[in-house]
Amino acid sequence: MSASVVAFAGSRIDRADHVRQSGDALAGLMNHRARLLLLDGLDPVISEDNTLSWGSLADADADAELVFLGLSEERGCFAAVPLAGSVAPANPRLWQAMATLDAEELATYGGARSMVDWHARHRFCARCGSPTSLAKGGWQRNCLSESCNAEHFPRVDPVTIMLVEHDNNILLGRQPRFPAGNYSALAGFVEPGETIEEAVAREVFEEAGVVVRDVAYVMSQPWPFPSSLMIGCHALADDPAITVDTNELDDACWFTRAQVEDAMRAAQAGGRGEAFGAPPPFAVAHHLLNWWVRRG
Amino acid sequence: MSASVVAFAGSRIDRADHVRQSGDALAGLMNHRARLLLLDGLDPVISEDNTLSWGSLADADADAELVFLGLSEERGCFAAVPLAGSVAPANPRLWQAMATLDAEELATYGGARSMVDWHARHRFCARCGSPTSLAKGGWQRNCLSESCNAEHFPRVDPVTIMLVEHDNNILLGRQPRFPAGNYSALAGFVEPGETIEEAVAREVFEEAGVVVRDVAYVMSQPWPFPSSLMIGCHALADDPAITVDTNELDDACWFTRAQVEDAMRAAQAGGRGEAFGAPPPFAVAHHLLNWWVRRG
């Protein structure tokens, strides 16, 4: 799968790891040519031409920590850590704003959002409770206590999300927070001590009571709320009997290929299919369902 | 790929998520029948029959935090959080001990190690610096400050590890810490804002200056040092010219299929091939190379 068929992928900013490793190189980029990604809290600031807005480092608060996002046309690109990190699910205004951005812009925004949000929520050392400070252009935080000195790194949380197939039908579920009539692929965090394939099988069994086999990787996509790596998979089920975990889901059921095709046509136009509403194009579930429809 | 072809996968302990969600269910399992995984710090305690050693909850320090690993034959399985977490790479004694364990036992040990190590290194709230306490059987920690109340979850860090192929040769590198003559697959953490495929391409270019295409997922494996999810991939390169990043690697070079086959035969017997020493069977790189050799 190429990056261009999913969302939040394909940023043109060069992450330039060698700059992060060199205080001198980093300092040399923090000049009048440097670009600062403008954010409203954690939300993007979008120009009239539907691109992200950039300013200069002078636009950041004087005491704000700056994250080095990478290089673009030999200029350093930065984002400032806001006072507060994310606490609640993203707001509807954000979904509307993101819909106006093209894939590259969405990728740049998503990566920057995950980074500054992580910093805002990790100002203290989890090992000893002391304050920490930003290091290596924001790709690390260091504990300021000399007796601890722990190093901390930005989180990326792998999440499995899967299309389970039985007899040309697909298993989808709905979480209580979904808009009425909407369904999506089942999903869950990979836990310590399990493979991607084990996580897929465990989650489907936990949430829907369905046993799967032949788990296969399909595609991946970052999901910056706050810092997930969505790992899209396909699996087969022999027995379609469902037992819904009502603590997790309102409902889970099988949809036919025709129902999925109809819902995906409607979703492309921002609408809802006859049988259900499919996830929006930001969501990897949307791209997984498209993959399955095209695969025939 | 089935779990059984990789290491640290295939534990028979049922993670029993429903128990974590219920204080009553959890308390009901913390009885005289409960099993405590015995650990020496973070190392396993191995019986004469080459299995993990288990005791009862009475074997834990009275004030130790207990992590619920899951259910085995309707008995609760737990591990106690040690005083100190991991700080240095694992010791050679640990590699020897792990070599005596079969796949299931290694999986149970690896998952438990990642969990208790995470707790030992996360006794404070990264958001506000206050103490935290174990919750939901150890699958969460809660900030004890009423003005913060942040919830924290165990980390799993996705790492890409890749076999890059050109003209039936494979690109391998050696890190300074490797035993003399040993080479392995290039690898690196997935960063916020990138797909698995993007991370593979970025890492190979950073470490060896090689441009790749057609990145394909092959297999995954947990790596509990401290909490990685290794995501094994294959990719193709058109231009074999290498520029080694000497900050990361001592060397990177192409090995022929015959050289890889020889090294893998030697590695199965715990030895070193003519051209290089291959990674041990704990490592996903070992299984990736086996996959490539068998694929022909």
Image (tube, coloured by chain):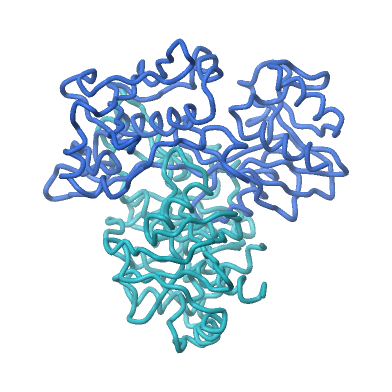
Chain colours: A blue, B cyan
Question: Which of B229 and B55 lies nearest the eye of the viewer?
Answer: B229
- Determine the image quadrant of residue A118: top left
Q: Is residue A218 above or below residue A249?
A: below
Q: Residue at x 20, y 38 (%)?
A: A132
Q: Position of residue B95 (x, y in %)?
A: 40, 75
Farthest top residue in view: A48
Q: Position of residue A68 (x, y in %)?
A: 29, 36
Q: Residue at x 28, y 34 (%)?
A: A76
Question: Which of A114 and B136 lies nearest the eye of the viewer?
Answer: A114
Answer left or right for A38 relative to B222: left
Q: Position of residue B61 (x, y in %)?
A: 33, 57
Answer left or right for B41 relative to B111: left
Answer left or right for A45 relative to A294: left
Q: Is residue A110 above or below residue B247?
A: above
Quarter of the picture containing the C terminus of chain B is bottom right
- Determine the image quadrant of residue A114: top left
Q: Is residue B210 above or below residue A76?
A: below
Question: Which of A77 and B88 lies nearest the eye of the viewer?
Answer: A77
Q: How many marks?
A: 0
Q: Residue at x 44, y 75 (%)?
A: B46
Q: Is residue B44 above or below residue A258?
A: below
- Determine the image quadrant of residue B219: bottom right
Quarter of the picture containing the N terminus of chain B is bottom right
Q: Residue at x 23, y 20 (%)?
A: A60
Q: Position of residue A290 (x, y in %)?
A: 72, 34
